[in-house]
Image (tube, coloured by chain):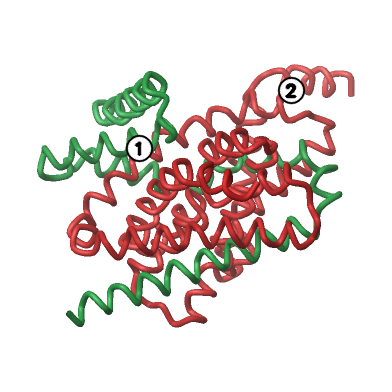
Chain colours: A green, B red
Amino acid sequence: MVGYLTLILCCQLFGEVIVGALGLPVPGPVLGMALLFIFLLVRGHVPEALGSTADGLLRNMSLLFVPAGTGVIMHLTLLSEALVPLSLAVAISTSAAIIVTALMMRFLSKAAADE
Amino acid sequence: MNNLSETWVYLSASPLFHLTLTLAAFQAASFVFEKGGRNPLLNPVLGAVAIVVAVLALTRTDYFTYFEGAQFVHFLLGPATVALAIPLYRQWHHVRSSWLAIGASLLTGSLAAVASAVAVLWVAGSSEALMATIAPKSVTAPVAMGIAEELGGLPSLTAVLVIVSGIFGAMFGPLLLNLIGVKDWRARGLAIGTASHGIGTARALQVNETAGAFSGLAMGLNALATALLLPILWGLFF
């Protein structure tokens, strides 16, 4: 359990170091995800204890966004000044991204299956 | 009374109170979400943020004091992002067999997110700085903030818009996908992750592991694609 938590933290640490050293445009943890993924490809399976450590983290992932979300209190004035356009933009753009991605994926998967 | 205020002074200076507040608010919001039949309007992240904001306002606490305690929770976002490699690995056979469809869908979805957000603000006559602030809003927060800064926006406001987009997608994404009749978990996950990054992924993981894996993949790829392409695209228009 502690061993695999260390592995996860090491992947993040290496991710951060590589991103910092090379000036890559992705965040360290995303590169860390890629590193852990490569580890799993080499290993050929997910060790059971790693699976349960990861599942524990991911099952409660929603909680982890609460501190960042609370940051909204620093922008209440700016937000209230442009509340209508910003809300509309977030709602329309998020919906558009979901609909376009899903329809495109369905269309392309069908096209591939028909070949 | 004197004792009580002394205790408050002690507690407000230690991280324990705001850490506990964060966990308790999330517990309460999750309880309401479950009791309400998992109604998307009762989204637990939204509910927990509302409770914490209300308590901070009532106790006149600023965000930095709150964050001293909440940072322990916030820190775990990094390891949790790394851990997304596990569902991705478990679903790898699905990903490998349709990588071209995944890449093309992701790019069009990512473009739709940026173009529609900027178009709405352009029609509303907003400033260029505000358009730059909202443009990367579907990308995971740390990357979105970097992009906004590069384009001349306000990174900390971008972070708020990113969170709101995540919550919006987690709330209404499944309804929208039902409405357009997309049932394939791969397409559903990819769509949620492209539009709503980690918050959408966290929600998708609770529903279906395939959807969660594709959502996590879309989150990572969208961060990469937007960070590389948006500054170039922006230069063509502004």
Quadrant in which the N terminus of chain B appears: top right
Left/right placement of residue B32 relative to residue B110 reads right
The image shows residue B23 at horizontal and vertical percentages of 58, 40
Which comes before the other along the chain, label 2 or label 1? 2
Question: Can I make out residue A37 in this image?
Answer: yes
Residue B12, label in figure = 2
Q: Nearer the viewer, residue B172 or A85?
A: A85
Name the element at disc 1: helix
Chain under disc 2: B
Q: Which residue is drawn at 40% across and 68% down?
A: B188
Q: Residue at x 73, y 58 (%)?
A: B122
Residue at label 1? Answer: B82
Name the element at disc 2: helix
> Which quadrant would residue B16 be assigned to in this image?
top right
Q: Which of B93 and B236 is in front in this view?
A: B236
> Which quadrant would residue A95 be assigned to in this image?
bottom right
What amino acid type is highlighted by mark number 2? Ser
Q: Which residue is drawn at 34% across and 69% down?
A: B185
The image shows residue A110 at horizontal and vertical percentages of 27, 79
Q: Residue at x 71, y 25 (%)?
A: B64
Chain under disc 1: B
Question: Can I make out residue B27 in this image?
Answer: no
